[in-house]
Structures are given as structure tokens and as C-alpha cells.
């Protein structure tokens, strides 16, 4: 809901449980009056009285400092001494600015952003235009509102309405002011094979900044932050999320002022950034998804999960059956031929998988990671008869066929590089940094995007391919393109990601029936921008049964479990060398889009039976993975147990899965789990335990966890029951 109170010049946005109120104050600035839980519209007068205290109406020329005013967009050099939201340098070098309200519009639905991923639908959008006092620059702030949701999409469009060019030195997407208080900031940090670890720190005075300078959203920090009010936990208290729908260099900052208020802002990273706007041109900053929860982090995560499924993912795939993949990577690495793969396909079918994915190594001279990348032509020496032989075998066994690509990359030892050495990101005379022996293609050049589109399209149109795994195995360096003028190199990083999005858009549109899975050596590019094109992402190269609990827990903070590819791998684990029981690996992999990452042709009968039963179980709970609500019951970062629970929206079904890791004294884990998310009034049966009890009792008394050895796991299936236990 969006309401305009004309007399008070106040705009009231309302979602499922938040209110967001702002007004044009007496000085003409757009000022925030409230963002948080529901308040009473009759109290508008009181809100304005409070707002006027922070920026009195007589402050028309900004004589008084503006750094107490909770602005909707921070400006620079005119008395607001906090960090600005935009910095616009004019041709004379001046960059002071101060924006005032000009006009607004309330529209139905969601705006479409050309070339950038965005919320696909919405109930209404509020767009408010501000003009600079000192230059012909305009900013339009967008607020995209969803009635049944606590997500609020924000972004900004900056316009050079003058006749001289201007240079944007910062152009963040949003500025969000939180009232005085003690807040903590939660972030997801990590590295290869250890993505999305959770760290929470107090927001002290000064600026706390999360960012990526790796050219991709990155393992280092995920483009997300949760700002938690004092006392906020998994199950209670207030928190605010900020998530960017963006996959390039980004920043999210939280600045605590003297008074204790906190300004949260973010968008494209301004470090190394500049963007020239010619007369009449606009720059559209990527969308940010803010989210409010008055019921702790768990509720925040559920709001984000719903939002991404309902508004970001391609609707035809968002909640559709996810391919049950058997992938050959950890089974063979580069060392395969048709003879080796055919039994793996047979094995995959026997297990109940429905898609076989041929990973890296099928093209060019690709027998190691320093050769062949970029040459998207089948290596018929390795695969006699091309892909057809494998595809035919898949068909015969009732499987679909999937294929790996790494479209944005090239090896120097490749036909592509030999033909077009100028197509890589590099600066003549400067030795480029190599990552995994490869260079990155310069996607700021349209001819490079065209070439990749054509060569990948050729393979996809000549073969019956149902699934694409789209990899990206290094960060960006050099940040330079010879095709961009010297004074505009600051545009490189953003232009690169626009090139990637263009490629993703073109390929997914040209092959709408193909299921695309994102990957970047695991979760290097796990973000809402990629999820707009690809409904699922390979969560991590780390498939260890213990490490996965933490990686999946962290990732679930702001992404739905159905976005995470979670495969059962062999032991000892390739990445950690650890051995965990097969049942444990299966249980953990059931809490996401499951599959197999092992040699399906070399399993013992016992292993086969166990994986078969895992896949059977997964099919039974798939609806919960695709559409259910996630309740995180036991935190693997803080306790000796991991446990998560999926509950159907109608609360008739649930699935609980967990793992214990002793790493301490036997029995060193809490042995009673309080179940959450069930209806208090319904009666449920826990199949494995033969327990029949009400949701209220299961939440209050909990259920005992079985006594298990190190890395032991369990799963419970819960259904609404008509039965009553006799007392
Ligand atoms: C990194 C991915 O994360 C792996 O799953 C695999 O596809 C390799 N790349 C292939 O090079």
C-alpha cells in the first residue's frame, strides 16, 4: 500500500508488517519519519512534530547542520557531514549538492530495468524526483512495494538534466536512516570452499563498510547485511536486511552518527568508480532489497526466501521441480571419455537421478585447467561421436542431459585467444594476473558478448541439452579495457557486469526451456542478480558433510534453500579429506536442491541403496524445499548440532533434518529441540518417532534428538494427523 497525505506532504508505504513513512519537510528535503513495525496512521501529526525537530522548517538554506536529519538521500558539501549517497562532479569540478523535492508519482506494478536484474512484479511503486540546488542534476528515488511481504525494493536513477557532462563518483542505490539505538551488523564472509560464514559485530561510531573489489559479488563478503537491533536473535527482535540485486563490485555501509542514528546505504562500489553522464543521460543504480522483521533473523530469512522465489527468479522455474543431477566432476575431473562416462550415466539412472551433467573438460583441448577455455567445440578425440553418444544413452536411461560452460573466461592456450588476444581484460605491456590459469574476457565489448552468445548457442541448439551449469572461476583484476576512453576507465567494472547480464539475458531468452545453474567455483557469485537469470547456484565446492551445514546455514540467511545446489559426494571428501557417514551427507544434501557429485558407476550395493533411498526421500519432500518455510533450529556455528526444519505454507507437513558433531564430550549437544513453524492448534505425527502431539506441545516441550556418534544425522517427516494418542 502507498498512500499520499497531500496536506502534510507525507508518503506512507506499508508492507505486511512494516510501515515506512517520509515527508517533504518545511525546508523541502525528503525526510524519513519512520521505518519499522506497524504504527498508527492517526499519529501522523506526532511523527511530523518529531521530524520537524530534526530539521526545523526555517532551515531552508541549510544554515543549520543537516547531519541530524534522517534524509532519504544523503548529499555532499552542504552541511550533512555523513557520507553522501551520490557524488556528482560537474564540468567545473564542483560537486557540492543538496536535493529537494520536485514531484512524485504513485504507479501500479513494478518498473522494468533494462539490462539489470530486478523485481519482476510488485503491487505499487512510489517514485519521487529531487533536484539539486546547485546544478541541473535530478535524482528519482524508487520504492517498490509488495503488499503481502516485508521486502521493500529501493533504487535510484540519476539524471544529468543540464547541457554539460557530469561525472558520477558515487551513485548508491539507497539511503536508509535508522533511529538512535544499539545495532549489530551481520555479514556473510568466506573464501573458496568456505562460503557464507556468519559474523556479527556491534556497529560503533564511524563507518562500517562491507564491499567487494573483486569484480564479482564474491566469496569474501556476500552482498547482504542484516542490521540487528539490540536483543535481536534468530527468533525474536527487530532487524533490517539490505541485499543487493547485483553481481559486481558493491558496497554496503552503516554510519553511526554522534546522536546514535545509523545511516545504511549501498549499491555499486564507488571505489575506483566513475561514470560520465552526457547531457540528458541517466544512470540507473541496481536494485536493493530492504527487508524488515520484528521477529528475528529467522523471519527476515523467510521474507527474503519468498521474495526471491516470487519476484526475482524466472517464474517458470522458481518453484518447478529441480533437476536431480548426477554430475561427473568429482568422479572423473578432466580424465574421461565416453567409455568412462556411459557407466556413470547408467549408474545415475539406477540411483533415481533424472539429469546427467557433463562438467568441465568436454571441449577444445581441455585436458587440464590451463588449456582450451573459450573453445566451445566438442573434443571428439575424447568423446567419439560427440555429445550425441552420451545424450542418446541418457535418453535410453530416461535421463536429461546437462553441460558445463564457463562463458566469460579464456585460456591463453586456446584457439579463441590466439585469434583474439585483444578480447581479454588486460593492459598492453602489463603482465595480467592469472587466476586458475585463465584470463577473463572483456565483456564491455559487444563483439565479445556476441561471440560467446553465438558459440554457446551453437552447442545448445545442435544438441538436446536441458541443463547448463554456468561457471566463473576467478576474480577480476586490471579493471581496464582498451575499448573504453582513458577518462572513462572508472566505468569498467560496472560495464563488465552489464555485459555479463546481457549475455545471461540473451542466452536464457534464446533457450527458455533450458534450466541454467549458476556457479563460480562454488559461491563466488551467489547473489540475487544471478538468481534473476539462473534459479539455482552451486553453493560451494566443499561437499563435506560437516562443512556444508555451516555453508548452507549462512547462505539461507537471505536466499531460499531451493536456490542452493546441494550434492552428495564421496568420502574421504575431496576438499577436506574428512569422512562422514553417507547417511549424513544425504541428510544435509536434502536441505536444498539435491543431486550427486560422485562416481555413480563405482558404488557398492549398500551405497546404492542408501543414495536411492535419499533420492526417494527427496522426491517426497521436494515441495517443502521448493515452497516451504525454513526454520533454523540449531546453529552449527554456535552449538554442536545443526538442525533445520522446512514447513509447508499450509502447515500440514514438515521435515526436520540435523547433524551432531561432538568435537567435545559425548552427549555435548542439547538433546531436546523445540520445533517451530507448526500450527499450535493442529495435531501432528512424527513418522520416525511415532509421536503424535499438537504443534503447541512440540514447540513448548520439544522433541529429543537421538543419541548419535560424531557426524551422525537424522531426519523426521512430520504430517498433520487425524489420530489422537490415547492417554
Ligand atoms: C568449479 C566448480 O565449482 C566445480 O563444480 C567444477 O565445475 C569445476 N569448476 C570445473 O572446472
Image (cartoon, rainbow, N blue to C red):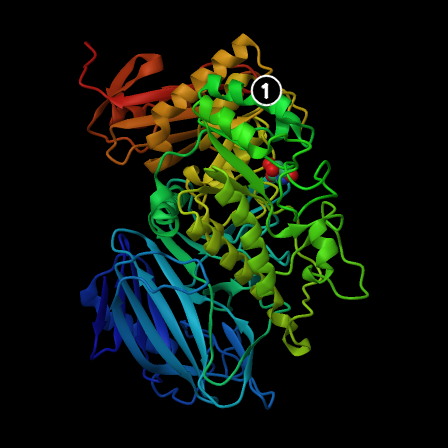
Residue drawn at 40 percent across, 83 percent down = 131
Q: Quadrant of ligand 1?
A: top right
Residue 561 locus on image (x, y percent): 43, 37
Residue toward you, 685 or 258: 685
Question: Residue 643's spot in the image, x, y percent?
Answer: 45, 28
Percent x, y for residue 716? Answer: 37, 20
Q: Nearer the viewer, residue 469 or 419?
A: 419
Q: Residue at x 55, y 53 (%)?
A: 454
Query: Outermost residue toward the front?
Result: 385
For the point 63% across and 31% down, the residue is: 383
Give the image location of residue 266, x and y in percent.
50, 63
Label 1 crowd (10 A; few <14 / some 14-19 / many >=20):
some
Residue corresponding to mark 1: 580
Looking at the image, residue 626 lies above or below residue 420 = above
In the rendered image, is residue 288 in sight?
Answer: yes
Relative vertical location of residue 224 with respect to residue 280 in this rendering, above or below: above
Amino acid at each position: 500500500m502507498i498512500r499520499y497525505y497531500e496536506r502534510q506532504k507525507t508518503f506512507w508505504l506499508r508492507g505486511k508488517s512494516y510501515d515506512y513513512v517520509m515527508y517533504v519537510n518545511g525546508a523541502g528535503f525528503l525526510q524519513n519519519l519512520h521505518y519499522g513495525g506497524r504504527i498508527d496512521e492517526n499519529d501522523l501529526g506526532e511523527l511530523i512534530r518529531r521530524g520537524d525537530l530534526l530539521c526545523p522548517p526555517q532551515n531552508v538554506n541549510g544554515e543549520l547542520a543537516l547531519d541530524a536529519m534522517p534524509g532519504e538521500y544523503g548529499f555532499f558539501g552542504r552541511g550533512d557531514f555523513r557520507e553522501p549517497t551520490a557524488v556528482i562532479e560537474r564540468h567545473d569540478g564542483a560537486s557540492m549538492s543538496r536535493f529537494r523535492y520536485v514531484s512524485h508519482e504513485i504507479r501500479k506494478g513494478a518498473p522494468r530495468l533494462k539490462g539489470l536484474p530486478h523485481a519482476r512484479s510488485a503491487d505499487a511503486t512510489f517514485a519521487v524526483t529531487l533536484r539539486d540546488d546547485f546544478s541541473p542534476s535530478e535524482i528519482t528515488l524508487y520504492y517498490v512495494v509488495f503488499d503481502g511481504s516485508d521486502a521493500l525494493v529501493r533504487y535510484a536513477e540519476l539524471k544529468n538534466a543540464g547541457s554539460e557532462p557530469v561525472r558520477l563518483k558515487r551513485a548508491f542505490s539507497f539511503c536508509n536512516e535508522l533511529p538512535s539505538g544499539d545495532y549489530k551488523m551481520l555479514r556473510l564472509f568466506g573464501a573458496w570452499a568456505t562460503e557464507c560464514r556468519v559474523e556479527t559485530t556491534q556497529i560503533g561510531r564511524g563507518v562500517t563498510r562491507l564491499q567487494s573489489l573483486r569484480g564479482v559479488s564474491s566469496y569474501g563478503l556476500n552482498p547482504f547485511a542484516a542490521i540487528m537491533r539490540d536483543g535481536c536473535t534468530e527468533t525474536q527482535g527487530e532487524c533490517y536486511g539490505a541485499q543487493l540485486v547485483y553481481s559486481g563490485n558493491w558496497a554496503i555501509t552503516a554510519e553511526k552518527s554522534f546522536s546514535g542514528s545509523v545511516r545504511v546505504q549501498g549499491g555499486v562500489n564507488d571505489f575506483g568508480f566513475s561514470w560520465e553522464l552526457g547531457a540528458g543521460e541517466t544512470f540507473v543504480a541496481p536494485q536493493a532489497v530492504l527487508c524488515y522483521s520484528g521477529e528475528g533473523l529467522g523471519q527476515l530469512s523467510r521474507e527474503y526466501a519468498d521474495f526471491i522465489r516470487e519476484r526475482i527468479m524466472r517464474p517458470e522455474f522458481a518453484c518447478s521441480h529441480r533437476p536431480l543431477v548426477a554430475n561427473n566432476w568429482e568422479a572423473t575431473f578432466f580424465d574421461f571419455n565416453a567409455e568412462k562416462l556411459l557407466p556413470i550415466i547408467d549408474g545415475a539412472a539406477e540411483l533415481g537421478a533424472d539429469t546427467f551433467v557433463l562438467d568441465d573438460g568436454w571441449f577444445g583441448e581441455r585436458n587440464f585447467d590451463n588449456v582450451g577455455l573459450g573453445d566451445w567445440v566438442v573434443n571428439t578425440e575424447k568423446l567419439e561421436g560427440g555429445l550425441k553418444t552420451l545424450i542418446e544413452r541418457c535418453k535410453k536411461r530416461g535421463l536429461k542431459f546437462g553441460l558445463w560452460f564457463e562463458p566469460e573466461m579464456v585460456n591463453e592456450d586456446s584457439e579463441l585467444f590466439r585469434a583474439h588476444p585483444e578480447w581479454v581484460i588486460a593492459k598492453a605491456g602489463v603482465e595480467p594476473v592469472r587466476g586458475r590459469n585463465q584470463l577473463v574476457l572483456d565483456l564491455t565489448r559487444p563483439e565479445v558478448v556476441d561471440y560467446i552468445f553465438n558459440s554457446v548457442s551453437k552447442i545448445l541448439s545442435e544438441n538436446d541439452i536441458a541443463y547448463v551449469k554456468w561457471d566463473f572461476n576467478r576474480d577480476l583484476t586490471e579493471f581496464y579495457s582498451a575499448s573504453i576512453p582513458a577518462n572513462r576507465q572508472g566505468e569498467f567494472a560496472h560495464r563488465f557486469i552489464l555485459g555479463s547480464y546481457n549475455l545471461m539475458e540473451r542466452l536464457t531468452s534464446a533457450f527458455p526451456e533450458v534450466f541454467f545453474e549458476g556457479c563460480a567455483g562454488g559461491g563466488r557469485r551467489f547473489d540475487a542478480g544471478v538468481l534473476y537469470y539462473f534459479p539455482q547456484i552451486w553453493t560451494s565446492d566443499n561437499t563435506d558433510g560437516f562443512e556444508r551445514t555451516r555453508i548452507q546455514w549462512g547462505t539461507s540467511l537471505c536466499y531460499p534453500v531451493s536456490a542452493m545446489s546441494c550434492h552428495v559426494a564421496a568420502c574421504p571428501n575431496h576438499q577436506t579429506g574428512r569422512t562422514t557417514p553417507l547417511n549424513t551427507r544425504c541428510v544435509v544434501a536434502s536441505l536444498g536442491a539435491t543431486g550427486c557429485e560422485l562416481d555413480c558407476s563405482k558404488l557398492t550395493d549398500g551405497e546404492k541403496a542408501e543414495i536411492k533411498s535419499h533420492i526417494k526421500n527427496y522426491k517426497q519432500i521436494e515441495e517443502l524445499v521448493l515452497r516451504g518455510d525454513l526454520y533454523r533450529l540449531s546453529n552449527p556455528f554456535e552449538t554442536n548440532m545443526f538442525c533445520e526444519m522446512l514447513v509447508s505454507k499450509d502447515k500440514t507437513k514438515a521435515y526436520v533434518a540435523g547433524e551432531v558433531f561432538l568435537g567435545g564430550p559425548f552427549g555435548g549437544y542439547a538433546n531436546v529441540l523445540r520445533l517451530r513453524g507448526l500450527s499450535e492448534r493442529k495435531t501432528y505425527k512424527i513418522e520416525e518417532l511415532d509421536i503424535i502431539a499438537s504443534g503447541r506441545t512440540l514447540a513448548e516441550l520439544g522433541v529429543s534428538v537421538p543419541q548419535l556418534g560424531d557426524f551422525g544425522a537424522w531426519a523426521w517427516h512430520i504430517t498433520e494427523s487425524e489420530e489422537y494418542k490415547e492417554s
